[in-house]
Image (tube, rainbow, N blue to C red):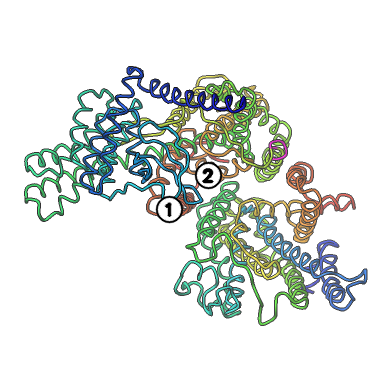
């Protein structure tokens, strides 16, 4: 019955969950069981690439929750993604142990290089997986809670809020670029060896990470659907459509906004934590404002306010990016820029909206 | 036989040519002397230089002084060679020569007195005239003394400073002599500093005390060093120590004050750049409620216009910046109007969408510039009149380009205020800003106003680009670095408020520069960003929010 409520939208949810389910079965089989010379073999490179797309889809869904359903356009969601990634990266750094270039049992290479004597206090505990996972959720969540509480309570809205979030990620980027911060400066964290004892280089680990990402995406989708179809979700939608009226009715608009903003940030952090072991690096350029804005375009392309559209947009745009940057590198920015303009001017509801129009189901 | 005769003639000819070249060179350097006199001068100079052929360093010092006193065109070269340990005696002839070591171990030698090339000798063919540290100090002073008579005032200043560094009080006489004929104020100041440095070491207490008192206004590092030494010197008398301490304190005070003035100046110049970058944004943001993320790229277009102007008119480098200002205004303004007509007008009332679309425009512009001009940075030359610095007060100098940008920002701001307050367009712009529907009802064609305002804001961004091209490298990413900063300025000052933008830009610039020495450039910037983020929580509409009905949306 609950599932019925979650899926009762149109065919989108069923298709999304169906595709994810198929991928979870087909990709491991095609990568691990089918021999390499067969046409049906999926290379590990492709598995990682697909896993990356799934993380981006998860991130896009997180943004869609706050932008599409609450009307809060965050231009700093890349920051939450990167913070989650850093938390995971710190765990992976601690797992290197003595296998680093300098072979120091305690300190990561870059700290040895900087002549640091001991681990900074905020690195403690990251050798334990459960602690790192807690931080993946807590750090972005707390930042979003504090930032959102300050911003929404003062009724910073609209473009002001967008600019503030952009400033937030910009400030974090500048800070993380500093070596003194203890996060590896502009090189970031990299050279990871293994996760929970399994080598990150092995095909099996890659496939497992892929499957975990797919499951995470599916559960995030169901969770977001649960949120937006709940009573709270309806209030949030009301806030998006008429901020003042909702307040006049008696709802504490800012509390709803803070709540949804924080949840969204936590989801973005989880996406970052799944992303880092698959690509093998996290550095401050993840904080750059351009990334966060690109993320907004994924959602816009897919269609905001649909959740599965955000996931679709993320995969479409990133597929185009992978293809264009390797085939026609100088065209990519023209294409992305053109896409921004085209989507906002001609396709305000994104690809999903276009499809709905074509199928004659105006919602 | 015939061949032999001819070759001997050639030898004769060669020798003749060589000796006459030497004579000509000598005559050219010292036009007042004839050939005979040059030889006589050479002879006496050789006699003086030969005094160096002694083992005693004391005698060598005497010889060096005598050489310095000798008015011979090669005096400076001989002393420099001696200082650089390139002065040798040739074993075979006993002549003093300037020798350069060869890789094989031998030397190429030149006569020290005439400068004549004497070919090569083996490793044992010449003996070095050795110098010790004391002699080196003396030589530096002597060389400085000669250069003190140089024609270039900068050289004379350098010479006076070198004398002060050498602290050889025997150079006093040279300084005093020069002071009598010197006319350049800066050289006089440098010589006086050197004299004060000498006096601070004087044995006579009254001279010393007078020197201490006289150095109150002197900001030279050497004087400060000397004073610090004296104030901690237990052998100096109580009075001298106290006087030195007092003077030192007042000097430190002046230095601190100058430092503050300098920081304020740097801050204002950074702030004026911010104001220039943000003010166009403030107009478009204020009038249309539109966030133009392509604003940074419009700045970049202005900077590239400067580059193109300089490439098109390489002869008019001095005026290129002046030509570039209107050119950049037109280029960026037209692009701005194009963006507004082509994209933004379809998106009014949807600020978030406008933000995204304009970001798309910025990507396209960036890539376009990258494709046309290459992704590498282009260097824009600075005209002569904008480079260099000037001395505001003694020891407080400022660079011209920063000063001009400060003035330029002021002029642009004033022009903009005039346009908005005194012209018909300005009136319409203000009307639309306050209440679009009412303005339309009163017969203002708001679409036209929108296009023109956007053009105006974009044009000013272009002009800001011209200014920026004089400060940083011109590259496709130039605009990106300023976009977040300009938004901060606009939001901090209050949207649609020109004065707010001015105050916000300047105060952020100054705050940044004051924080920098304590926190470093990056942390200063982060702190300023965090401050603004917090400030916006406190006053969500900036320092000078719009009041009344206009503030409702």
Q: Of the residues under marks 2 and 1, which one precedes in the sequence?
A: 2
Give A163 or B303, whichever is nearer the viewer: B303
Which segment is the magenta one?
Answer: B369-373
Q: Which residue is mark 1?
A: B520
Pointer 2 and pointer 1 on the same chain: yes
| Residue nearest the viewer, comparing B472 with B429 | B472
Residue in the picture at 36% in, 42% down = B263
Q: Is residue A34 left or right of residue B112?
A: right
From this view, report whether residue B404 is shown above or below residue A286: above
Q: Nearer the viewer, mark 2 or mark 1?
A: 1
Q: Secondary structure at mark 1?
A: loop
| Secondary structure type for disc 2 | helix
> In the figure, is residue B245 to the left or right of B331?
left
Give the alpha-carbon distance from disc 2 to disc 1, as whole Å.
Answer: 18 Å
Question: What percent of the width, then of the height, locates residue B120?
Answer: 47, 42
> Which of the pair B456/B42 is nearer the observer?
B42
Residue B196 in the image: x percent, y percent? 18, 38
Q: B1 and B481: which one is in front?
A: B1
Magenta: main secondary structure equals helix
The chain that hosts pointer 2 is: B
In which image quadrant can residue B404 be found? top left
Q: Quadrant of residue B200?
A: top left
Q: Kindly give the residue lying farthest to the bottom in the view shown.
A: A197
Tell me how many marks there are: 2
- Residue at which label 2 appears: B485
Relative to residue A21, is residue B369 depicted above or below? above
Residue B548: horizontal and vertical position, in percent?
Answer: 50, 36
The residue lying at 58 percent from left, 63 percent from top is A188
The reply to whether the magenta stretch includes residue B371 is yes
Image quadrant where one finds the C terminus of chain B: top right
Dot 1: within a 10 Å radius of its alpha carbon, few (fewer than 14), some, or many (20 or more) residues? few
Chain ID for label 1?
B
């Amino acid at each position: 019955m609950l599932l019925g409520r979650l899926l009762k939208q149109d065919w989108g949810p069923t298709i999304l969950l169906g595709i994810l389910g198929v991928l979870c079965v087909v990709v491991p089989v095609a990568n691990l069981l089918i021999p390499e010379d067969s046409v049906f073999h999926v290379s590990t490179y492709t598995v990682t690439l697909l896993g990356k797309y799934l993380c981006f889809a998860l991130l896009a869904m997180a943004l869609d929750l706050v932008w599409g359903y609450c009307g809060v356009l965050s231009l700093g969601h890349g920051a939450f993604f990167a913070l989650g990634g850093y938390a995971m990266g710190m765990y992976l750094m601690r797992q290197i142990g003595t296998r680093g270039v300098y072979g120091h049992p305690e300190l990561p290479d870059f700290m040895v290089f900087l002549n640091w004597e001991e681990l900074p206090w905020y690195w403690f505990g990251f050798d334990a997986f459960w602690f790192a996972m807690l931080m993946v959720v807590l750090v972005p969540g707390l930042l979003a809670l504090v930032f959102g509480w300050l911003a929404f309570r003062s009724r910073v809205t609209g473009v002001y809020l967008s600019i503030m979030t952009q400033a937030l990620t910009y400030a974090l980027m500048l800070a993380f670029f500093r070596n003194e911060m203890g996060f590896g400066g502009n090189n970031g964290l990299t050279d990871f060896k293994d996760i929970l004892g399994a080598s990150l280089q092995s095909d099996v680990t890659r496939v497992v990470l892929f499957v975990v990402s797919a499951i995470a995406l599916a559960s995030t989708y169901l969770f977001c659907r649960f949120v937006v179809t709940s009573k709270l979700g309806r209030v949030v939608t009301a806030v998006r459509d008429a901020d003042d009226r909702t307040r006049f009715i008696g709802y504490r608009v800012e509390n709803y906004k803070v709540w949804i903003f924080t949840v969204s940030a936590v989801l973005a952090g989880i996406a970052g934590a799944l992303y880092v072991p698959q690509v093998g690096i996290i550095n401050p350029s993840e904080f750059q404002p351009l990334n966060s804005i690109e993320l907004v375009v994924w959602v816009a392309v897919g269609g905001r306010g649909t959740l599965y559209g955000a996931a679709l947009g993320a995969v479409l745009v990133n597929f185009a990016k992978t293809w264009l940057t390797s085939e026609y590198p100088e065209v990519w920015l023209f294409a992305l820029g053109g896409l921004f303009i085209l989507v906002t001017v001609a396709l305000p509801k994104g690809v999903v909206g276009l499809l709905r129009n074509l199928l004659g189901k105006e919602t | 036989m015939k061949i032999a005769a001819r070759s001997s003639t050639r030898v004769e000819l060669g020798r003749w040519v060589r000796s006459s070249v030497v004579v000509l060179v000598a005559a050219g350097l010292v036009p007042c002397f004839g050939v005979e006199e040059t030889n006589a001068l050479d002879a006496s100079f050789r006699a003086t230089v030969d005094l160096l052929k002694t083992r005693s360093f004391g005698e060598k010092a005497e010889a060096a002084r005598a050489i310095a006193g000798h008015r011979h065109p090669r005096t400076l070269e001989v002393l420099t060679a001696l200082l650089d340990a390139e002065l040798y005696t040739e074993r075979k002839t006993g002549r003093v020569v300037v020798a350069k070591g060869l890789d094989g171990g031998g030397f190429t030698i030149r006569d020290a007195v005439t400068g004549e090339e004497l070919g090569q000798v083996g490793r044992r063919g010449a003996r070095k005239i050795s110098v010790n540290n004391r002699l080196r100090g003396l030589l530096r002073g002597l060389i400085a003394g000669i250069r003190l008579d140089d024609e270039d005032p900068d050289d004379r200043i350098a010479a006076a400073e070198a004398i002060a560094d050498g602290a050889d009080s025997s150079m006093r006489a040279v300084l005093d002599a020069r002071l009598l004929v010197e006319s350049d104020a800066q050289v006089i100041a440098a010589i006086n500093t050197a004299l004060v440095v000498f006096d601070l070491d004087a044995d006579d207490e009254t001279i010393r005390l007078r020197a201490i008192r006289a150095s109150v206004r002197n900001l030279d590092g050497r004087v400060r060093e000397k004073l610090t030494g004296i104030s901690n010197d237990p052998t100096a008398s109580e009075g001298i120590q106290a006087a030195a301490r007092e003077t030192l304190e007042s000097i430190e005070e002046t230095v601190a004050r100058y430092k503050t003035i300098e920081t304020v100046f740097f801050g204002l110049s950074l702030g004026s750049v911010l104001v220039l970058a943000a003010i166009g944004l403030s107009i478009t943001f204020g009038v249309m409620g539109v966030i133009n993320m392509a604003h940074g790229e419009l700045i970049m277009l202005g900077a590239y216009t400067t580059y193109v102007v300089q490439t098109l008119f390489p002869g008019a480098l001095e005026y290129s910046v002046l030509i570039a200002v209107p050119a950049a205004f037109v280029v960026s303004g037209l692009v701005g109007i194009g963006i507004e007509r082509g994209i933004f007008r379809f998106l009014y009332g949807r600020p978030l969408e406008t933000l995204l679309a304009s970001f798309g425009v910025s990507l396209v512009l960036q890539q376009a510039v990258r494709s046309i001009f290459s992704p590498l940075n282009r260097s824009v030359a600075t005209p002569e009149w904008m480079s260099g610095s000037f001395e505001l007060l003694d020891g407080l100098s400022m660079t011209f380009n920063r000063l001009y940008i400060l003035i330029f920002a002021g002029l642009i701001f004033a022009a903009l205020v005039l346009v908005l307050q005194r012209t018909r367009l300005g009136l319409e712009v203000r009307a639309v800003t306050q209440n679009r529907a009412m303005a339309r009802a009163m017969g203002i064609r708001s679409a036209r106003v929108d296009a023109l305002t956007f053009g105006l804001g974009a044009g000013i961004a272009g002009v800001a680009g011209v200014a920026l091209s004089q400060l940083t490298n011109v590259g496709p990413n130039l605009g990106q670095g300023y976009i977040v900063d300009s938004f901060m300025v606009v939001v901090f000052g209050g949207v649609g408020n020109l004065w707010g933008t001015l105050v916000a830009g300047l105060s952020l610039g100054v705050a940044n520069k004051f924080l920098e020495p304590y926190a470093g450039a990056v942390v200063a910037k982060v702190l300023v960003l965090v401050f603004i983020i917090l400030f916006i929580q406190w006053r969500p509409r900036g320092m000078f929010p719009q009041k009344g009905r206009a503030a409702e949306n």
